[in-house]
Amino acid sequence: MIPAPGQASRGATPQIAEAVITAVAGASLGALVGAPFGVSIPLGVIAGLNGAVCGWRGTYDWRSPVGVVGFVLDSTWAFGTTAGAMLAHLAARLRGDPQYHDELSRRHNRHVYGRGFQMRPRFAFTLGNVIAGAGDLTGERRRRLITDHEDVHVWQARWFGPLYPVLYVGWLIGAAAVGVAVWAVRRRREPFAKVVESCAYYLNPFEWWAYSRDDHWPPKGLVAGIGWKRPVVRPFGRVIR
């Protein structure tokens, strides 16, 4: 793994030591949890790879209980999305310069790429502890999208573990069908794609949660008169700043 910008100053010895220790600890946790289900090797490998990458980059904040909890969840309960994160790292590398943002990643319990895998242009995409497609982060609004919105998805994946992708994708499929019905009932006053997108994506409880934390509810893409009118939780800006 090639060091990201800003990492050279850490020194090779402590960087390698953290990578090795985190890899061994992660692999041990993954293997321990997977043993009763006969999947100790794949879980150990996934957790070990994650530990190596995160240790090399100094991702986890070991001085905070939050960082320790993030590491434990990434290595055990959230193994599925952690495996996806490994693919996201690979996708970022395959795109050439991944534009890794060390200042938003190191000791922040996440990885932030300016480029990488994206489902839609200009939309950031979070897979496990990797945020890809962050884009130009010189503006305050775009940085807050990463710190207050996408970081919520990082923790949703950790807390819900294997249930997260099932619930998220399940809502997308089911609510898309509902969106078709809503479009028909509303007598096609709005574009079909916008109504379906509003129901399937914007009204997804995981997105409602993230947009609310980002103090961006309702989002501009949501068709007026459809769905929740108020945020589900208080924005981070009003809670911790």
Image: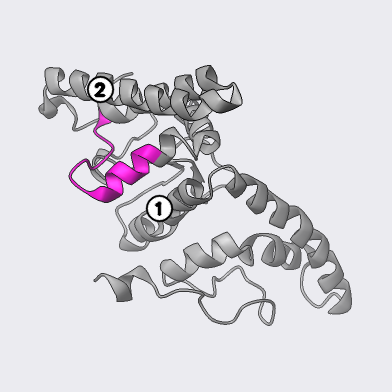
Residue 140 image-quadrant placement: bottom left
Residue drawn where x is 33% and y is 22% of the image: 23
Element class at badge 1: helix
Of residues 100 and 66, the one nearer the viewer is 66
Residue drawn where x is 51% and y is 34% of the image: 79
Residue under numbered circle 1: 151
Residue under numbered circle 2: 21
Q: Is residue 28 above or below residue 88?
A: above
Say what amino acid the circle numbered 2 marks.
Ile
Residue 118, x across and y down, in percent = 55, 41
Instruction: Please identify the quadrant where the N terminus is shown.
Output: top left
Q: Which residues are magenta?
A: 57-72
Q: Is residue 172 above or below residue 221?
A: above
Residue 167 placement, left or right of 114: right
How much space separates mark 1 and mark 2, taking CA atoms?
25 Å
Say what amino acid the circle numbered 1 marks.
Asp
Residue 212, x across and y down, in percent = 47, 70
- Residue 241 drawn in magenta: no
